[in-house]
Image (cartoon, grey):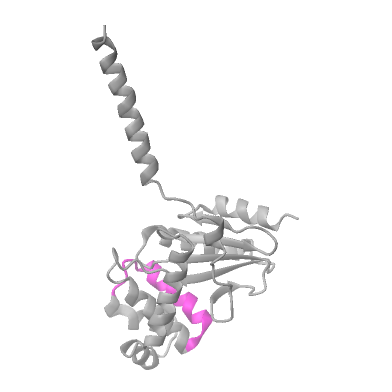
């Protein structure tokens, strides 16, 4: 009689163990207190759209992340449509996952050099080149720079002498991502004055981001 319960009990226990293992492996959403650590958007940030927009989407991204590539396209569409009236801005922050993407830091340095040489617009054009050619080839940085109209010599000089200042900026972005609980890329936070931050962990679709933006803009 006792043995008749053994197999069903084992199945139930096995299911519980699997459920616990699956739950433990799931990414944990950042706590509310952790999200308060997000660095305020400032003049030094890379911003596409109106810097004074009431809705700011801060993305922490890695140029070798395939999900980041698709999300980059999504966000460009969001800014072209929902950001056209100046109510939505996109803030890009570096989050190179150097543990799994050996070239991620170099890509980030190249993008920062584009910004240093020719400003914010050049940064966004260069990031587009990096994602378009993913996985980007570091020997082609000069060609990418030429494609977007950058001075080859100025860009080459910046990259060849990538300063501790550039790396400090990149690592500050990365550390901020870790501080607020990001466990992968893309990791984004929608910021609206007077409302709690909304987390997007992963490469959300255009429809999903638009719905969240519409909610954020609702009074």
- Image check: 27 left or right of 40? left
The N terminus - image quarter: top left
Evaluate whether residue 94 shows in this view: no
The foreground one among 142 and 192 is 192
Stretch of the chain drawn in magenta: 118-137
- Image check: 34 left or right of 158? right
| Residue 53 belongs to magenta span | no
Q: Main secondary structure of the magenta part?
A: helix
Residue under the point 31% across and 66% down: 135
Residue under the point 36% across and 62% down: 65
| Residue occupying the far top of the picture | 1
Residue under the point 35% across and 92% down: 157
- The percent position of residue 58, horizontal first and vertical second, equals 54, 66
The foreground one among 141 and 64 is 64
- The percent position of residue 151, horizontal first and vertical second, equals 41, 90
- The percent position of residue 72, horizontal first and vertical second, equals 47, 63
The foreground one among 6 and 103 is 6
15 vs 45: above or below? above
| Residue 123 belongs to magenta span | yes
The C terminus - image quarter: bottom right
| Residue occupying the far right of the picture | 219
């Amino acid at each position: 009689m006792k043995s008749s319960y053994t197999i069903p009990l084992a199945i139930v226990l096995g299911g519980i163990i699997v459920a616990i293992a699956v739950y433990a492996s799931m990414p944990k959403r950042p706590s509310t207190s952790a999200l308060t650590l997000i660095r305020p958007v400032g003049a030094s940030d890379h911003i596409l759209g109106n810097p004074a927009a009431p809705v700011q989407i801060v993305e922490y991204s890695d140029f070798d992340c395939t999900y980041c590539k698709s999300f980059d396209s999504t966000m460009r569409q969001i800014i072209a449509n929902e950001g056209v009236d100046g109510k939505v801005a996109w803030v890009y922050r570096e989050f190179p996952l150097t543990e799994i993407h050996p070239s991620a830091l170099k890509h980030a340095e190249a993008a920062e050099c584009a910004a240093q040489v020719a400003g914010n617009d050049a940064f966004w054009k260069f990031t587009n080149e990096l994602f378009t050619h993913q996985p980007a080839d570091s020997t082609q940085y000069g060609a990418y720079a030429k494609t977007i109209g950058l001075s080859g010599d100025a860009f080459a000089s910046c990259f060849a002498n990538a300063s501790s200042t550039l790396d400090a900026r990149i690592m500050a972005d990365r550390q901020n991502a870790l501080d607020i609980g990001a466990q992968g890329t893309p990791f984004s936070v929608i910021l609206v004055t007077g409302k709690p931050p909304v987390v997007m962990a992963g490469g959300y679709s255009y429809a999903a981001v638009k719905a969240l933006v519409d909610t954020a803009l609702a009074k």
